[in-house]
Image: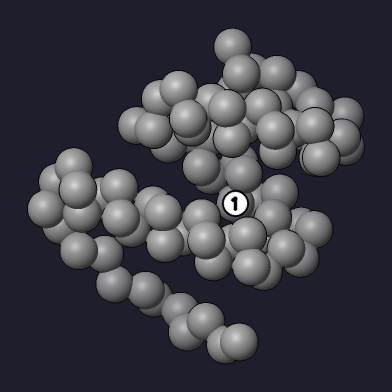
Amino acid sequence: LNYLKGYCLNIENNSSKSELFLKKSIELNNSFWPSYELLFNIYDRRSLLNEMKELIEYVRQQVKTKTGIKLDLEIVLVE
């Protein structure tokens, strides 16, 4: 339900509220990847680079914990 609210708010260009619902969606079910993807796209569109980096690191950590697979970055993060 939180993902759906976040998705609808994003379509209405209300990315700030959408972000809150998507974070809640991830908190409740951190295996539901569409929430991560949409949140990443919002951060990208709003140029929130620190938030993008934190989300990438969180996802890498979740994948490592759940699967034992270490994800390598395909891009270089320049600070």
Going by the picture, which residue comes out furthest to the left? 68
**How far across and how far down the image is residue 21, in percent?**
66, 27
Residue at 48% across / 30% down in the picture? 27
33 displayed left or right of 14:
left
Outermost residue, bottom side: 78
Q: Where is residue 74 shown, x and y percent of the image?
A: 39, 76
Q: Quadrant of residue 22?
A: top right
Q: What residue is drawn where x is 60% and y is 51%?
A: 40
Q: How many marks?
A: 1
**To which quarter of the image does residue 69 belong?**
bottom left
Image height check: is 70 above or below 37?
Answer: below
**Along the line of sight, the residue nearer the viewer: 17 or 36:** 17
Q: Is residue 23 left or right of residue 70?
A: right
From the viewer's side, name the closer residue of 22 and 37.
22
In percent of width and height, residue 71 lies at: 26, 64
Residue with the mark numbered 1: 40
Residue at the limit of the structure toward the top, as seen here: 1
Taking the image as shown, residue 36 lies to the left or right of residue 16, namely: left
Q: Residue at x 59, y 61 (%)?
A: 52
> Relative to 27, is 68 on the left or the right?
left
Callout 1 crowding tier (Cα within 10 Å): few <14, some 14–19, many ≥20: many
- Mark 1 secondary-structure assignment: helix
One can see residue 76 in this view: yes
Q: Quadrant of the C terminus?
A: bottom right
Q: Residue furthest right?
A: 13
Looking at the rendered image, the quarter that the N terminus falls into is: top right
Q: Vertically, is 41 above or below 4?
A: below
Q: How is the image coloured?
A: one colour
In this rendering, is residue 13 above or below 53? above
Which three-letter amino acid code belongs to the residue tagged 1?
Phe
Residue 7 visible: no
Above or below, 53 against 62 in this view is: below
